[in-house]
Image: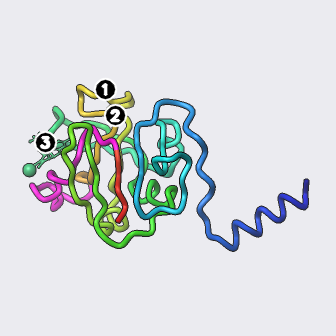
Amino acid sequence: MIRFLIAGFLAVGLTGPVSALDKPKGKVVLTVTGKITETNGSAGAEFDLAMLDALPGRTARMKTPWTEGETTFSGPLCRAILAAAGANGTAPIVVRALNDYAADVPLEDCKSLDMILATKINGEPIPVRAKGPLFVIYPFDKDASLYNEKYFARSVWQVKSIEVR
Ligand SMILES: Nc1nc2c(c(=O)[nH]1)N[C@H]1C(S)=C(S)[C@@H](COP(=O)(O)O)O[C@H]1N2
Ligand SMILES: [Mo]
């Protein structure tokens, strides 16, 4: 037993910090495809809400064009999702919605901005009719210069998948 554990830790040390992805137990809300090393299903890396909420994330209060007044968003950081999937692409990711709207999001946004895929608005899961279950939210609270059409167009709601290229 101990020997297996030690071998396991050594293997992790050699291959990098990415831990194996669990199988989703709940409804799959996000599928990450393309240039990834971690998969847990034939479609790629599949996540239910619990898996997403277990990743490093952020909670922040801000104004957005899509919500009334100050609103609290919380969810995993885009870079944490990419890390969990072992993403190793170089081109912008394609973030795709249930209605097949898609936006190219530069990897740099995920690396250097605390951009999240919100799973909650004001502490509650986001129904599809309220632009859920996942909503790309830029840190408009930290950086007012993001509050423009360029980033609004990347603010995909009803997200269902991310393609890593
Ligand atoms: N799912 C989804 N997200 C989307 C869009 C869309 O059509 N579908 N349009 C994008 C664009 S181009 C912009 S400018 C903003 C527009 O938000 P609004 O329609 O509420 O003004 O949302 C972005 N997110
Ligand atoms: Mo837009």
Mark nearer the N terminus (2 vs 3): 3
Measure how far apart labels 1 and 2 are at the Cα level: 6 Å
Q: Quadrant of the C terminus?
A: bottom left
Q: Residue at x 41, y 37 (%)?
A: 29
Name the secondary structure under disc 2.
Answer: loop
Checking the image for residue 65, the label placed there is 3
- Count the marks: how many? 3
Measure how far apart labels 3 and 1 are at the Cα level: 18 Å
Measure how far apart labels 2 and 3 are at the Cα level: 18 Å
Residue designated by label 2: 133
Q: Amino acid at mark 1?
A: Pro
Farthest-out residue, front: 42
Label 2 CA crowd tier, 10 Å (few <14, some 14–19, many 20+):
many
Quick one: 124 or 164, which is closer to the camera? 164
Whether label 1 touches label 2, CB < 8 Å? yes
Q: Amino acid at mark 2?
A: Pro
Residue designated by label 1: 127
Whether label 3 touches label 1, CB < 8 Å? no
Checking the image for residue 109, the label placed there is none
Whether label 2 touches label 3, CB < 8 Å? no
Q: Which residues are magenta?
A: 142-160
Q: Amino acid at mark 3?
A: Pro
Label 1 CA crowd tier, 10 Å (few <14, some 14–19, many 20+):
some
